[in-house]
Image (cartoon, helix red, strand yellow):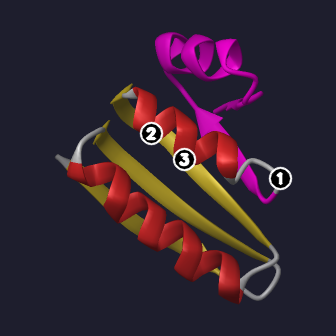
Amino acid sequence: MLKISVVSQSREKTILQIEGWVSGSGVALLEQEIRSHLQAAEQLLLDLTGVMAVDPDGIDLLRRNRDRLRLRTGSAFIWALLNMHGLKPEKG
């Protein structure tokens, strides 16, 4: 299950808190949210500190949008996974 919450929103930057598993139908939901928020803000920060796992489709989604996304993670596992795929997350 995936939970997505808007933490803050402005024309310059939106912060979304992502919790749970970025997999299956959650990837499509996250893709819709990313598209929607990138139309309204110049930059989108995904706070992934509550993410437990990211499947290959989730990694692909993040890689396709990496030019306009910032990623923050707390888990060493998620940080290593994203870093291994060239996504350079910030440690939160």
Decide: few, some or many residues near mark 2? Use Cα within 10 Å; few <14, some 14-19, many ≥20: many
Q: CA gap, disc 2 to disc 3?
A: 5 Å
Q: Residue at x 46, y 62 (%)?
A: 31
User: What secondary structure is found at the residue carrying circle 1?
Assistant: loop
Is disc 1 in contact with disc 2, using a CB cutoff of under 8 Å?
A: no
Per the image, the residue denoted by label 3 is 61
Q: Residue at x 54, y 81 (%)?
A: 36
Question: Eyeballing the image, is 17 above or below 83?
Answer: below
Per the image, the residue denoted by label 1 is 67
Q: Residue at x 71, y 31 (%)?
A: 89
Residue 19 is covered by the magenta coloring: no
Task: Specify start and end residues of the magenta stretch as a single range.
Answer: 68-92
Decide: few, some or many residues near mark 1? Use Cα within 10 Å; few <14, some 14-19, many ≥20: few
71 lies left or right of 18: right
Q: Position of residue 54 (x, y in %)?
A: 40, 29
The amino acid at mark 3 is: Leu
22 lies left or right of 43: left
Q: Position of residue 44 (x, y in %)?
A: 69, 64
Q: Between residue 80 and residue 15, name the one nearer to us.
A: 80
Q: Between residue 8 and residue 46, name the one nearer to us.
A: 46
Question: Eyeballing the image, is 81 above or below 13?
Answer: above
- The label on residue 3 is none
User: What secondary structure is found at the residue carrying circle 2?
Assistant: helix
The amino acid at mark 2 is: Gly
Residue 83 is covered by the magenta coloring: yes
- Give the mark nearer the N terminus: 1 vs 2: 2
